Image: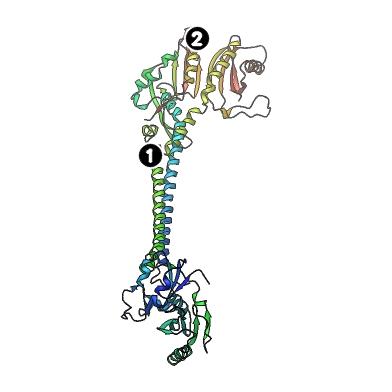
């Protein structure tokens, strides 16, 4: 029954207003939820990266321990001191050692922040470093232990008999030539 | 008969157990004119709209019925009332043609023993608008004057509104007047009984719409509040994750840097060419030492990557790669047989004891009177 008593029916207007409120609320809800989702995604991303970082922590430490920093080796003398051939029982003519090559190291197209410094003896063909030891056994042992160092690179080992000394009957010091003898240094 | 009582006068109000009253007769005064004064002390009610429809709503000059009710009703707040006039108005405004409605109630008799007369309301509607409203007293049916007065009433209606269809409604009984259709209780359908006080003030009209609006606003603000608190929580979580000392110590955190760290890890883990060098040196030197009276003229051992290595010695069709793993020049005392034979024997011995595949280099031997010099290449097996 149509109410004859009502002067002005507020109900439809009230419903419209309520509907506007609801719509606005829904819109606000949606946009805020989007923001929440974006924030959560950023947090998730951060957590993921953190996880990866902590997984690589151990290797970071290994990196700094394995390769000495370039800054700690400002010149050739300190470099030779750092290599410390003496601890391996071998020796080189330090006055005649020169830097043959200096290049950055790449792992799969990416420079990893490592420099390779190659040394050679000034005399000779320039591609190798001459080292000597008291005896062949010491020489070989020294080269072996040198080759096992992670920061040292050796391309080839060449042993040559000093034929002249042999003929003269003199006892010459055993000499080996280490080809492509290089050291890794960290760039930072 | 429904559960309400028809009340036409003050005396009718008293007594009775019903809580619903249908008001009319002398308890209600209605007029189409605003300046028509009601009897003294009558209380004004909200004016009723006397037309229906959307167009009428927009029309500012809607006819209104000004309604007043007897003051005694104010003393009866618990009673729920409905106005007979409202029912007739509602019915009449739905009619599309010209209709004259004869309605009203019976009055209680003044003196005991007599029959009461009728308080008759006549409402004339044209196309859903009320165009006339007046009331008239009729005597009781038993009175001889009844027929005359009724006929006069009808004649008056017919004279003024010749096109009108005349109908009679409850609570009047069917008088069986000529040319009058009796509708009975049809106009009285859908009566709503409300306490009289509320009808005057009409405050309850605001309650439902207001509550709907408040509900809507509440939902709105609740939604905003909830979502915002969720957002704050998400931001707090982010802050917590970002404030990890590991990150702060490390500084920047991006996939490029992590990539770099991963590549460094790979670099450190990858096998190196010179890993096999010491073993090769040992092997060949020991093997040579087994040969009698041998002199090494030159021994050159390369740190070749594992890819250059030969497959295990089982396969016959292995082709050595260009760079051998070692080159050797040995000086041996000349044996009795030919050089190649001696070379073959020496190589076999060396290979057996060192595990390295050896081969004489092309034109790889020289000899003088006492000694032979062999140039040998060797490949390590994978």
Whether B172 is drawn above or below A124: the answer is below
Whether B338 is drawn above or below B94: the answer is above
Tag 1: Cα neighbours inside 10 Å, few (<14), some, or many (≥20)?
Answer: few
Quarter of the rendering occupied by the C terminus of chain B? top right
Q: Secondary structure at mark 2?
A: helix
Q: Which residue is mark 1?
A: B239
Q: Select label 1 or label 2 by which is in front.
A: 1
Depth check: give the residue in front, B169 or B331.
B169
Residue sitting farthest toward the front = B113
Left or right: residue A12 versus residue B307 is left
Percent position of residue A146, x then y: 47, 19
Mark identifier at residue B166: none
Mark identifier at residue A167: 2
Depth check: give the residue in front, A49 or B267.
A49
Q: Secondary structure at mark 1?
A: helix
Q: Please say which color scheme the image uses.
A: rainbow
Q: Is residue A73 visible?
A: no
Percent position of residue B229, x then y: 39, 46
Q: Report in which chain the residue with disc 1 lies.
A: B
Residue at (59, 27) in percent of width and height: B309
Hey, which quadrant is residue B380 in on the image? top right
Q: Is residue A166 visible?
A: yes
């Amino acid at each position: 029954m149509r109410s004859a008593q009502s002067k002005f029916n507020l109900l439809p207007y009230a419903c419209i207003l309520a509907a506007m409120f609801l719509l606005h609320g829904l819109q606000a809800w949606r946009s805020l939820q989007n923001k929440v989702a974006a924030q959560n995604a950023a947090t998730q991303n951060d957590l993921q990266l953190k996880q990866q970082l902590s997984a690589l922590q151990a290797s970071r430490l290994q990196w700094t321990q394995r390769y000495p920093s370039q800054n700690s080796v400002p010149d050739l003398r300190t470099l030779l001191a750092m290599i410390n051939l003496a601890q391996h029982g071998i020796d080189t003519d330090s006055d005649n050692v020169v830097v043959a090559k200096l290049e950055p190291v790449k792992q799969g197209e990416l420079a990893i922040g490592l420099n390779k410094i190659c040394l050679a003896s000034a005399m000779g063909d320039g591609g190798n470093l001459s080292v000597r030891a008291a005896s062949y056994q010491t020489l070989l042992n020294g080269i072996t232990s040198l080759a096992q160092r992670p920061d040292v690179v050796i391309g080839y080992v060449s042993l040559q008999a000093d034929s002249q000394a042999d003929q003269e009957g003199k006892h010459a010091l055993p000499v080996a030539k280490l080809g492509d003898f290089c050291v890794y240094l960290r760039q930072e | 008969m429904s559960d309400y009582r028809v009340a036409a006068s003050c005396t009718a109000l008293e007594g009775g157990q019903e809580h619903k009253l249908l008001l009319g007769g002398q308890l209600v005064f209605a007029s189409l004119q605003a300046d028509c004064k009601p009897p003294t002390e009558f209380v004004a009610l909200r004016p009723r709209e006397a037309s229906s429809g959307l167009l009428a709503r927009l029309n500012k000059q809607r006819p209104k019925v000004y309604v007043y009710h007897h003051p005694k009703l104010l003393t009866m707040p618990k009673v729920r009332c409905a106005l007979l006039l409202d029912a007739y108005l509602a019915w009449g405004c739905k009619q599309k043609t010209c209709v004259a409605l004869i309605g009203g109630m019976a009055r209680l008799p003044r003196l005991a023993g007599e029959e009461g007369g009728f308080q008759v309301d006549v409402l004339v509607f044209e196309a859903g608008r009320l165009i006339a409203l007046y009331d008239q007293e009729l005597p009781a049916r038993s009175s001889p004057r009844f027929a005359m007065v009724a006929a006069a009433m009808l004649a008056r209606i017919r004279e003024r509104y010749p096109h009108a269809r005349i109908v009679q409604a409850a609570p009047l009984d069917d008088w069986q007047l000529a040319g009058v259709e009796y509708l009975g209780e049809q106009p009285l359908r859908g009566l709503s009984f409300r306490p009289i006080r509320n009808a005057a003030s009409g405050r309850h009209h605001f309650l439902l719409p207001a509550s709907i609006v408040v509900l809507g606003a509440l939902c709105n603000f609740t939604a905003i509040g909830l979502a915002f608190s969720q957002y704050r929580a998400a931001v707090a979580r982010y802050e917590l994750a970002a404030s990890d000392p590991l990150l702060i110590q490390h500084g920047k955190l991006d996939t490029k840097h992590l990539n770099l760290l991963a590549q460094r890890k790979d670099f450190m883990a990858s096998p190196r060419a010179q890993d096999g060098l010491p073993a090769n040196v040992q092997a060949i030197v020991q093997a040579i030492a087994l040969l009698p009276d041998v002199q090494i003229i030159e021994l050159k051992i390369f740190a070749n990557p594992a890819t250059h290595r030969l497959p295990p010695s089982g396969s016959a069709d292995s082709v050595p790669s260009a760079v051998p793993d070692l080159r050797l020049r040995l000086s041996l005392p000349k044996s009795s047989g030919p050089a190649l034979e001696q070379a073959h024997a020496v190589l076999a011995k060396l290979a057996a004891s060192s595990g390295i595949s050896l081969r004489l280099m092309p034109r790889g031997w020289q000899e003088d009177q006492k000694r032979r010099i062999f140039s040998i290449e060797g490949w390590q097996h994978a």
